[in-house]
Amino acid sequence: YGNLIFAVSQTNEIMVGQVAQAIPWRTPSYVSSGTQTGESVQLEIPGRTRFGGYLIEATVCTINLRFEIRDSKFRASSPVERFDLEKVKLPLQVRSRQAGDRFVPLGLGREKKLGKFLTAQRVPREERKKVLVVSDSEKIIWVWPIRISEQAKISAGTRRILQLQITDVES
């Protein structure tokens, strides 16, 4: 998209921002298996981290944005997501979902049990087993590949962006 950045506002409107000043995306060439804690792995930021058959790439960008509202359509999740780094409490962990997980899905604005959310989104049972959870030290920020959290979304005040890309390297 060149020098444009797209984000979702507090009212779920798609916003287009022009990059006024940017530090290039930084991604080291090394691949780490992260710091293992139980069944979760701590993400290298910036860096590349392995978790089972997945590769998670984290990059950081500092920008100055000027936003204008263009559209009010809701945006679904993808294998690449961007987060407001100021709203994320490092370190980040990636893990499989667990019973009792709760998060605030983008567009919902209130906390919901992850299992009930996946059912409401009509995610097939077999696909639910493949869902990954990316969390910071306080909350879930991304249910991959379904939805990011309202609590970590990019807004008009965002100055530092964390981009995460999760790739299934065994597919």
Image (spheres, rainbow, N blue to C red):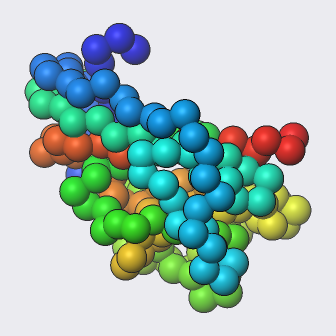
From this viewpoint, is residue 115 visible?
Answer: no
The residue most toward the top is 2
29 to 24, vertically: above or below: below
Outermost residue, bottom direction? 100
Give the residue drawn at x 23%, y 43%: 160
Q: Position of residue 15 (x, y in %)?
A: 26, 31
Q: Nearer the viewer, residue 23 or 10?
A: 23
Q: Is residue 162 visible?
A: yes
Closest to the observer, 121 or 84: 84
Residue drawn where x is 45% and y is 65% of the image: 92
The N terminus, quarter of image: top left
Residue nearest the observer in this picture, 147 or 32: 32
Extreme front residue here? Answer: 30
Q: Residue at x 79, y 53 (%)?
A: 53
Q: Identify the residue at horizontal 87%, vertical 41% (top origin).
A: 171
How many labels were placed on the picture? 0
Q: Quadrant of residue 21?
A: top left
Residue 163 is situated, as x and y percent measured from the top left of the image, at 42, 41
Residue 157 lies, in percent from the top left, at 13, 45
Q: Position of residue 73 (x, y in %)?
A: 41, 35
Q: Is residue 38 left or right of residue 124?
A: left
- Front residue of this view, candidates 109 and 39: 39
The answer to whether 68 appears left or right of 41 in the picture is: left
Q: Is residue 93 above or below residue 38?
A: above
Which quadrant of the structure image shows residue 59?
A: top left
Name the side, left or right, on which 44 lies relative to 128: left
